[in-house]
Amino acid sequence: MNLYAPAAAGRLAPRAAAARPLVYVPNSHDGTVTVIDPRTYRVLRTFATGALPQHVVPSYDLSTLWVANNLGNTLTPIDPATGREGPGVPVSDPYNLYFTPDGRFAIVVAERRRRLDFRDARTMSLVQSIPVQCKGVDHMEFTADGRFAIATCEFSGQLLKLDLETRTVTGYLMLDPGGLDSTAMPQDIRSSPDGRVFYVADMKANGVFLIDPAAFRRIGFVATGKGTHGIYPSRDGRLMYITNRGWNTTAGGRHGPGSITVLDPATERIVATWPVPGGGSPDMGNVTADGTELWVSGRYDDEVYVFDTRTGRLTHRIPVGREPHGLCVWPQPGRYSLGHTGNMR
């Protein structure tokens, strides 16, 4: 089984194929989104959103790109066919946004309010709020059978497991149970292609924890680089591109020891490390539709990085606004989106 096979290069759904090829970069500090032409690597324009935009998220049905305006308490819709934004939709505290595998619900990750808000995936009307007991809930992945989700809790060093059928939290897992001063600060979370292992990027531990999603227990760890943050599968699912932000704190500086680690999920071994020449802070992004480029935001350096996935070479650095975060490369292959910056299936 390869969960990522439907998102292989060239497998664009009709709606995605009709989209204008663009890269959308939310500048958290500025309250804006910068739009880049991926063919010329030039900025086309920058438009205002609500306060503190965090991620640009493809909807489940691929008809809309949502900008999650965390402090603005809105989702700004973008029409992917034109690249133009519409009026904001009110929602509470949208740090991140996901969609259940059956497409029925959007899950707004309300980090500050310690909630997971289930909303109608089309209208965004609230269906149910689920309180969580951990701190800093932010990223999420779904089991292969679509029954459960596992979310990371950045500020308490935990994971939570959510039953999607009953919409209840079934348990919490401490990633570093050894003491009060936790060395865990989990960020992004992604499944292995076969669904048997979840990889959890950890900014303090400087690597990825390996989690058995069925047993909900830690089964391993792979060191990657300083400030491990995002995880993106290659188009064929044979590799995982892992961003190392270069800092172990949420307030980093410029020109840190940022890099990309390339992990083989079949062997759980590192096969390459791509440095950012002169330093940088690679954060969130995704792979292009053909799989030849990895685009990621430079969170503390106010720029976007473009890596050639065939050579590992950094080919472009594009200046954008302040604190660029969860950029979205669009279109991407896949039948539907599970959220974030394009978790495609």
Image (spheres, rainbow, N blue to C red):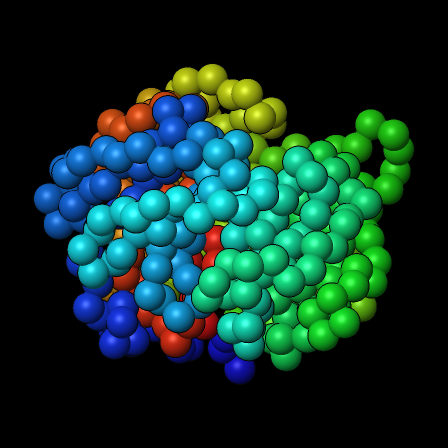
- Position of 223 with respect to 11 (left or right) is right
Q: Residue at x 51, y 58 (%)?
A: 124
Of residues 268 and 59, the one nearer the viewer is 59
How far across and how far down the image is residue 114, in percent? Answer: 72, 42
**Which of the 4 image quadrants contains residue 59?**
bottom left
- Position of 181 with respect to 201 (left or right) is right
Quarter of the image containing the C terminus?
Answer: bottom left
- Position of 335 with respect to 183 (left or right) is left
**Which of the 4 image quadrants contains residue 180?**
top right
Q: Residue furthest bottom?
A: 1
Q: Residue furthest left?
A: 40
- Regarding residue 216, the answer to whether it shows in the image is no
Q: Residue furthest top?
A: 253
Q: Residue at x 25, y 76 (%)?
A: 14
Q: Residue at x 22, y 49 (%)?
A: 84
How far across and how far down the image is residue 82, in percent? Answer: 18, 55
How far across and how far down the image is residue 221, in percent? Answer: 68, 50
How far across and how far down the image is residue 141, in percent? Answer: 60, 61
